[in-house]
Image: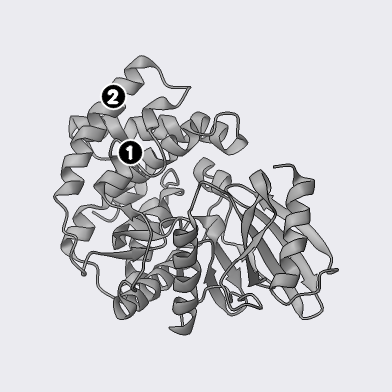
Amino acid sequence: MHLETAHELARAALDRFGLDAAAPLRFVKYRENHVFRADDPAGPFAVRLHRPGYRDEAEIRTELEYVRTLRAAGVPVPVLLRTTDDEPFARVGAGDDARLASVQRWVEDAAPFGDIADALSGAHDPDEAAFTRIGALLGRLHGAGDEVGIPAGFQRSAWDAAGLVGPSALWGEPTLLGSLTSRDRSLLRRATTELDGRLRSLPTGTADFGVVHADATPENILVTRDGLVLIDFDDFGTGWYAFDLVTAVFHHARNPRYPDFERAIRTGYETERPLTDSSLGAWDDLMLARGLTYLGWAAARSGDPAAEFIAAVVAPFVLTAAEDALDGRPAPWRRHPSLQEHT
């Protein structure tokens, strides 16, 4: 879709949510969805045009209603608006340009915790206390999920073994990444087969498995004067709770201080709810699974700058981790010198 068309659709959505149709509207970003900022007299709002084919109507409804439930339960997530017809989204446009649009209050005076590329390349070197706060945030999220349970009509994908590394993995097939050699593909197929078996043996009871954000990257955690805010539930679903923690630290796995970050996020999480032994034991398997999902994501988006970055920077690291797993060696994030000081 051309940006001009997306801009027109976002403007058409404003009136549907009771906002000023003439409010200044500025493009913010496009990845899976187009996002705009509308400066309405009542304040700034984010307008999101959901990409067709990525999530169906039932999944988007589930996402928006669940985020609203989390907000009511005290989890720091954005404030979502309803349409003037009391719906969580509006249909705008027609034909191939038709989109579902949702609106939320802009989180003011906020900045992302970090940039994914900076984190993966080692340029982002935060204080470990930040990860303690992130762990507590994710603990609050899962704790609220414990209380809410799975609502009736819940329609979202599962980040289980099949969703992470199965033949129809949610983010695509990692071996299709164009930069891989035939040896790389053979290595990933063998590692994925072994990993699939281990993940299938993990518990899926309520102590370990439930509703997860599934994409708690540095860019989806906002730092505000009042604390952290978790945004972008586009990929949320069910999965192992530890997967959310792993996602939050994976991007810093090449940092020599990674062991400190891992301990900090676990400590913060356990101020809100416990981590089971099975969750802790699955940590490195989930780290490898997370890495494989990024390769699958990039394989399906050849030419995208983020995909090219993953191919150049992330893929070699994941290949090393996969080979270590097959050979019974410690994962690369377990071989940092700073870890030896604490073992």
Q: Residues within 10 Å of mark 1 (few under 14, many from 20)?
A: few
Q: Label 1 sits on what residue type? A: Ser
Which residue corresponds to mark 2? 187
Left or right of residue 313, residue 281 in this image: left
Q: In the image, is residue 223 above or below residue 333?
A: below
Q: State the residue in front, 32 or 194.
A: 32
Between the C-alphas of marks 2 and 1, the distance is 19 Å
User: Which quadrant is the N terminus positioned in?
Assistant: top right
Q: Position of residue 23 (x, y in %)?
A: 83, 69
In the rendered view of the protein, which quadrant contains the C terminus? bottom left
Residue 271 in sight in this render: no
Q: Amino acid at mark 2?
A: Leu
Q: Label 1: which residue?
A: 168
Its colouring scheme is one colour
Seen at 64% across and 75% down, the residue is 83
Measured as percent of width and height from the top left, residue 97 is found at 68, 47
Mark 2 vs mark 1: give the one in front.
Answer: 1
Vertical order, 120 against 55 (above or below):
above
- Residue at 47%, 84% (x, y): give it: 72
Q: Nearer the viewer, residue 6 or 95?
A: 95
Image height check: is 308 above or below 59? above
Mark 2: secondary structure: helix
